[in-house]
Amino acid sequence: MVSTNQTLAERDLSVLWHPCTQMKDHENIPIIPIKKGQGVWLEDIEGNRYLDAISSWWVNLFGHANPHINAALKDQLDTLEQVIFAGFTHEPAIQLAEALVALSPKGLSRCFYADNGSAAVEVALKMSFHYWRNKGQTHKTKFITLENSYHGETLGALAVGNVALYKETYAPLLMDVITVPGPDCYYREPGESWADYSIRRFALMEQVLQRHAETACAVIIEPLVQCAGSMRMYDPIYLKLLRAACDKYNIHLIADEIAVGFGRSGTLFACEQAEISPDFMCLSKGLTGGYLPLSAVLTTDQVYQAFYDDYQNLTAFLHSHSYTGNALACRAGLATLEIFQQQPILENNSQLAAFMAKIAARFNEHPNVAEVRQTGMIVAIELVKNKHTRETYPWQERRGQRVYQYALSKGVLLRPLGNVIYFMPPYIITEEQLLMLVDVAWDGIQQAVKD
């Protein structure tokens, strides 16, 4: 039997349960079976193409079926696919860790692998807590996080996040954390700069740090962009002030760069824009160029030494995953970093980001757009019912979903966050393709705001 979009969709819906999805929606919205990807394009079973404007959930940096990463994986397949990473090692894991340490902010000298972004956050949280325990400071048990933050959906990561849609249902299962009002510049006063607003909001964080200095393990933060929190953004000065305050009050700083790392923010790592080094940096998503699950937690030698001891003292960090340091994933990660080294990716991204800013400026004049904001290769467009009062659309109306469905009909994959339309494309996208993307988004918004 020849497969069609419909037959594959029917088979899928008879056995699968998809992530972040109300499956009943697919009674009316067709699920799309993808046959192949090439560059910025995805192609379904029947040959329809879709421009991947969100990098397949922010992971794909250099396009689908990238020749350099493909070749590296084909070579790796002939030598080693996986080996236990306790008591054993392999060259791809070593080379990737060496490269990450060399590229990361100063002082991050140790690399611990995990499987995905949520797992990396769990590792960082546990390492911070365990560090203070090993140092005899057992009263340090609390974590500080920002409102509107998102760090993943396993229980520890969910606990330190603050997006109600993901967290509220599971609240009885989660540890208590300290939540601080954030620096989200959407709420700045008219005429107030991002920097001034971020500085003003940091005063609230400093009060909390001072009050909880004796009991707090760490602050966890998404540098510059709260991605799942509607792509809200703030100024690097907040990070600089936070680093200084964490030092002052003896509290770890965890930088969750899972979504913004590897060039998304305009620099290789977002922390670079504040010229700071965190105590822990969580990486995933773009780490393998969108090919395979892998994450890494980079930390300092000071943290590492707190666990380096005789076995009998039971201070070792006993966190593990079966696929820790997977050879194929590490090789994909290494190939991804090689592309950064061999090509002027960040320079090219700077030009692309400037072009994105230019062509997205038209949305500022739309009567239902409250704000167009940008950090590097991320552009977000906030839809509202009333531009002047910033009254939001009721979430039940799912205006963003209307944009999603319209865009698919025009060959573009957009997946809005509520009523926020955003572009986070692969770095190989062309200006012509960006123009197409903006035109489709504009027309989709026009359709979505009709009553």
Image: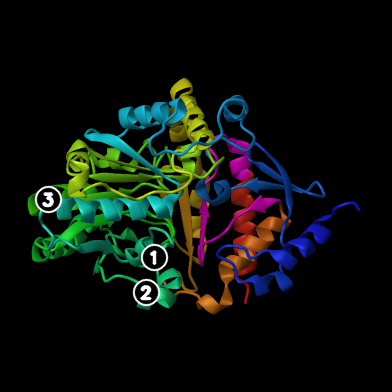
Is residue 43 among the parts visible in the rendering? yes
Residue appearing at x 41%, y 53% in the figure: 119
Classify residue 303 by image quadrant: top left
Residues at marks 3 and 1, CA–CA distance in whole angstroms? 26 Å
Q: Which residues are magenta?
A: 411-435
Residue occupying the far top of the picture? 342
Residue 437 in the image: above or below residue 232: above
Instruction: State the residue in front, 144 or 229.
Output: 144
Give the left or right position of residue 395, taking residue 240 as reference: right
Mark 2 highlights which residue?
A: 173
Q: Position of residue 82 (x, y in %)?
A: 53, 36
Determine whether the residue tagged by mark 2 lies in a helix, strand or loop: helix
Identify residue type, mark 1.
Leu
Residue 332 in the image: above or below residue 59: above
Classify residue 107 by image quadrant: top left
Residue appearing at x 48%, y 44% in the figure: 323
Which comes before the other along the chain, label 3 or label 1?
Answer: 3
